[in-house]
Image: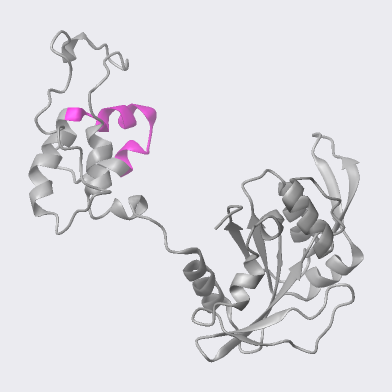
């Protein structure tokens, strides 16, 4: 198998459990490490292989590779040579690197979706309300990233007109924020860490599988019909029923994108 490239071996291992076990041969990946690592153009503290793995024995002194029966993972190896190789190899190292900053992801998302007219996006979710520093406030005070271009005249009853932003000094887009209740109740619930009644949705019991069923309020349904996409601000919680309700409300119209922001409760 040394005649195959590491990428080909990874594809081969994805075909079946048998080949997955075969291509994880530690001798094979240790050979690849010794052969290829000197030729990698760069390496950093995140992706560099463990410093002891090239000199350490594959198994402990009182065990033998022959002791392992076919298809049985009876011996524990000191290092996972395949994972160490893939972590440092240029063709696969990207998944180990830190992701781009959240605001850079947001701006590139809008850049790919901006049509000729000003698009509108509905932003909602618990992460937008449970932050010590409001996400909306931070967006409004980040002129180097997304300058505020004004407030449009188009109003939606019970929702408002949202805030318009300028991207790259040429593309305008509008964000409508959907809060579960008024500001005073949200602030009190955040400080006291209490749950609040969500006025965006009406819960109608459970479905056959036991999952809760909720329906967007009339003003939220109107928003779902007119916006071009959705931004769900998550807070590492399992309330997926709300996002399903909003997306189901927009069915029958053209396909609309969804951006999910996973936020923490503090800066």
Q: Is residue 7 in sight in this rendering?
A: no
Q: Is residue 110 left or right of residue 11?
A: right
Q: Nearer the viewer, residue 35 or 175?
A: 175
- The rendered magenta stretch, by its main secondary structure, is classed as helix
Count the labels in the image. Answer: 0
Q: Which residues are magenta?
A: 11-26
Q: Nearer the viewer, residue 266 or 244?
A: 266
* 184 lies left or right of 97: right
Residue 231 on the magenta span: no
Give the image location of residue 164, x and y in percent: 67, 83
From the top left corner, tell me how far across and down residue 229 is, in percent.
68, 70
Q: Residue at x 24, y 49 (%)?
A: 45
Looking at the image, residue 232 sits to the left or right of residue 110; the answer is right
In which quadrant will I find the N terminus? Answer: top left
Residue 250 placement (x, y as % from top left): 78, 65
Q: Nearer the viewer, residue 16 or 193?
A: 193
Q: Decide which of 190, 21 is in the foreground and name it.
A: 190
């Amino acid at each position: 198998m040394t005649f195959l490239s590491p990428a080909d071996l990874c594809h081969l291992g994805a075909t079946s459990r048998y080949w997955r076990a075969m291509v994880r041969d530690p001798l094979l990946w240790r050979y690849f490490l010794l052969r290829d690592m000197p030729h990698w153009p760069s390496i950093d503290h995140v992706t560099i292989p463990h410093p002891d793995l090239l000199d350490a024995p594959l198994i402990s002194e009182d065990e033998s590779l022959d002791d392992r029966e076919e298809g049985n993972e009876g011996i524990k190896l000191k290092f996972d040579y395949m994972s160490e190789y893939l972590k440092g190899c240029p063709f696969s190292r990207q998944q180990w690197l830190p992701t781009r900053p959240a605001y850079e992801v947001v701006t590139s998302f809008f850049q790919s979706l901006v049509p000729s007219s000003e698009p509108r996006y509905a932003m909602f979710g618990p992460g937008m309300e449970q932050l010590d520093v409001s996400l909306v406030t931070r967006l409004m005070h980040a002129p180097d990233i997304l300058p505020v271009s004004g407030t449009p005249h188009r109003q939606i009853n019970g929702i408002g007109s949202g805030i318009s932003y300028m991207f790259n000094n040429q593309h305008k887009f509008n964000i409508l924020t959907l809060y579960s209740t008024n500001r005073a109740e949200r602030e009190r619930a955040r400080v006291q860490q209490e749950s609040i009644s969500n006025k965006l949705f009406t819960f109608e019991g459970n479905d056959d599988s036991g999952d809760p069923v909720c329906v967007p309020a009339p003003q939220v349904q109107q928003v779902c019909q007119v916006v071009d996409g959705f931004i769900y601000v998550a807070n590492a919680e399992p309330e997926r029923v709300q996002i399903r309700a909003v997306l189901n409300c927009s069915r029958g119209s053209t396909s609309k994108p969804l951006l999910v922001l996973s936020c923490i409760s503090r800066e």
